[in-house]
Amino acid sequence: MDPITVSQVNNYIANKLRTDYNLRNMPVEGEISGLSHGGGHIYFSLKDSESIIRCAIWRSQRAKIDETLLENGRKVVVIADISPYAKGGSYSLSVRRVEARGEGALMAEFNRVRRLLESEGLFDEAHKRPLPFFPRRIGIITSDTGMAIDDIRKTILQRNDYVDLLIFPTIVQGPKAPASIIRNIEAANELNRNGKVIDVLIVGRGGGSPEDLAAFSDENVARAVYDSQIPVISAVGHTEDVSICDFTADVCAKTPTEAGKLITDTFELREEIMDRTRILGDTIRNRMRVEKRSLEDSTRLLRSGIESRLRELRLEVEKSVLLLRENDPRNIMKKGYAAVKDDDGRVITHVSQVNSGREYEIIMSGGWMTATAGSVHEQEGEQEETDGSER
């Protein structure tokens, strides 16, 4: 037997599917998951407890669809045809109409947890803590192999490369994810209590289907986020995704990248403060230099004035010393002059004070002597007034 090609097999199966009457206008019940838009078309999956099938609402059919029914977790009935894709060996449902059927299991659990925690006050704004202005260490609870950690690290380090990032590798989807997330939140808080201060925690992951993100709507995970002593930013999925952790966290970021930006906004403020501090420091230093020069100039002027005054005073002192030296009796006596005292020790200042026959003390350079006055001669015109005593 000659072999056939893969394309022949796929084309054969595709033709069989297209011509099967039972695969046209099928009412299919399931829960919506992975809702997305692209090129004017709407894409999602329908799932039940055991299987999943991809669906598409083409742009030409959207006017016939009640799009308010399209919500992740909602249980619906779609009227659809089988739509095989021969090249890929796959098939999907081409949806013509959507009808409401009831709440899906995932959405039912989401709403139960949301109603419970809201009634307990875990969503109240009064419990929300502000992010620290200048965090130095940031804890990141997410998968260490996904895109989320790369986005967060890149966003933060591009804006600030001296912050310490502490990564807690975490399982973020599947049945083991809730316990892993809780364990790492508790580990971060234990480190914080033991002195390795963590200023803020980012808890989250990148985008995915509602099933992929379900761990972040787990009741115990949401409670662990609320109970954290470290402020928490919830960063789960894409902009349109919502988790219970978004409500119990202190801050909700639409994406992991936005979480990084929220943190680094405070770093930009810090840089601005540091810049202003540097400018203020430069201004103070410049002012101090100006004042120092002014003080030095004033000091020089004052010193110059003092020195000038001291020179003047020194000259005056030298003149006084010279005058005193010139009028020193000892120096005068060296020139041949003498001082005369009577026997009462009074200095004789005029010849009219001398009495003949009286003894006087004569002080001269080198010593003194006594002498008795003989005749006394007074020059005319030099007579001094006396007390009338006889000479």
Image: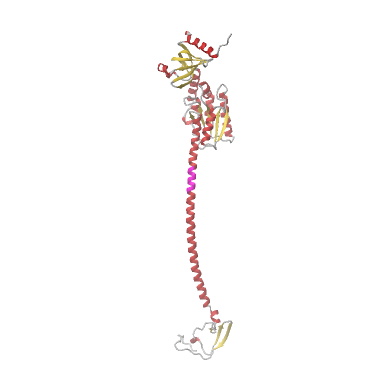
Dominant secondary structure of the residues highlighted in magenta in the image: helix
**Residue 122 showing in the rendered view:** no
Rendered position, 86 above or below 215:
above
Q: Nearer the viewer, residue 321 or 345?
A: 321
Q: Residue furthest front?
A: 2
Residue at point 48%, 40% (across, down): 272
| Magenta stretch holds residue 218 | no
Locate the N terminus by quadrant: top right
Residue at point 51%, 71% (across, down): 317
Q: Can you give x and y, in whole percent of width and height, for residue 182 in the image?
A: 56, 27
Q: Can you give x and y, in whole percent of width and height, for residue 43 in the image?
A: 47, 19
Please give left or right for residue 58 compared with residue 218 in the image. left
Rendered position, 168 above or below 29:
below
**Residue 158 showing in the rendered view:** yes
Rendered position, 327 above or below 49:
below
- Report the coloring of the rendering: secondary structure
Q: Nearer the viewer, residue 180 or 205?
A: 205
Q: Nearer the viewer, residue 225 or 326?
A: 326
Q: Residue furthest bottom?
A: 375
Residue stretch in magenta: 275-283
Total count of labels: 0
Q: Residue furthest left?
A: 63
Rendered position, 387 above or below 149:
below
Q: Can you give x and y, in whole percent of width and height, for residue 376 in the image?
A: 50, 90
Q: Nearer the viewer, residue 302 or 131?
A: 302
